Amino acid sequence: MRKLVEQTLKDFGYYTPDSANLVLGTIAQESGYGKYHKQINGPALGICQMEPNTFNDIMNNYLRYHPDIIEKIKLVIHDQTIVVQDLITNDRLAICMCRVHYLRMKGAIPSTVEGYAQYWKQWYNTPLGAGTTDQFIRNYNLHVVGDQD
């Protein structure tokens, strides 16, 4: 998973080691490191478990005003269309959309696992979400630590 995330973010032009670790942690927390491509009893899709409403908000209220980023995504995913249902089957699209979601947020991406967990909780899961920073840290340590593939 690490190689896929890092290469996708490099191809996209939004790679830093911390952004890759944050996306990897998000994947570990949200989908069991890619185990689930559809949320059980919920609407979220893809390895980052992005909800269609979030996807649509990013498309309509951010990417619409950043056509350069849309073009980069199209190059990375090798497709001229960006459709929410493709999150299920196109991991590179899911990674790009997760990274764009974080691009919109305030503050620099932290550089520690605890910081990633707090950033994820604040901006991805949201304070009202069911996930916890302890779960994120546990899943990060379980899946991401030691993944050199």
Image (cartoon, rainbow, N blue to C red):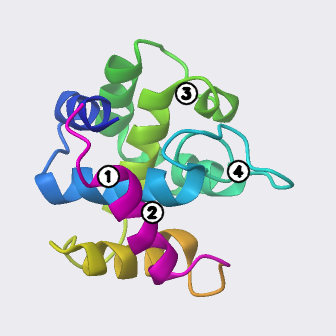
State which tag comes first along the sequence, 4 or 1: 4
Q: CA distance from mark 4 to mark 3?
A: 16 Å
Q: Is residue 62 visible?
A: no
Dot 2 and dot 1 residues touching (CB under 8 Å): yes
Dot 4 and dot 1 residues touching (CB under 8 Å): no
Residue ID at (64%, 49%)? 56
Quick one: label 2, few (<14), some, or many (20+) residues within 10 Å?
many
Give the label on residue 82, or none. Answer: 3
**Residue 25 inside the magenta-drawn segment:** no
Dot 4 and dot 2 residues touching (CB under 8 Å): no
Q: Where is residue 14 shown, x and y percent of the image?
A: 20, 45
**Residue 131 inside the magenta-drawn segment:** yes
Q: Where is residue 81 shown, x and y percent of the image?
A: 55, 20
Q: Which residue is mark 2?
A: 139
Q: Which residues are magenta?
A: 130-149
Left or right side of 87 for 142: left
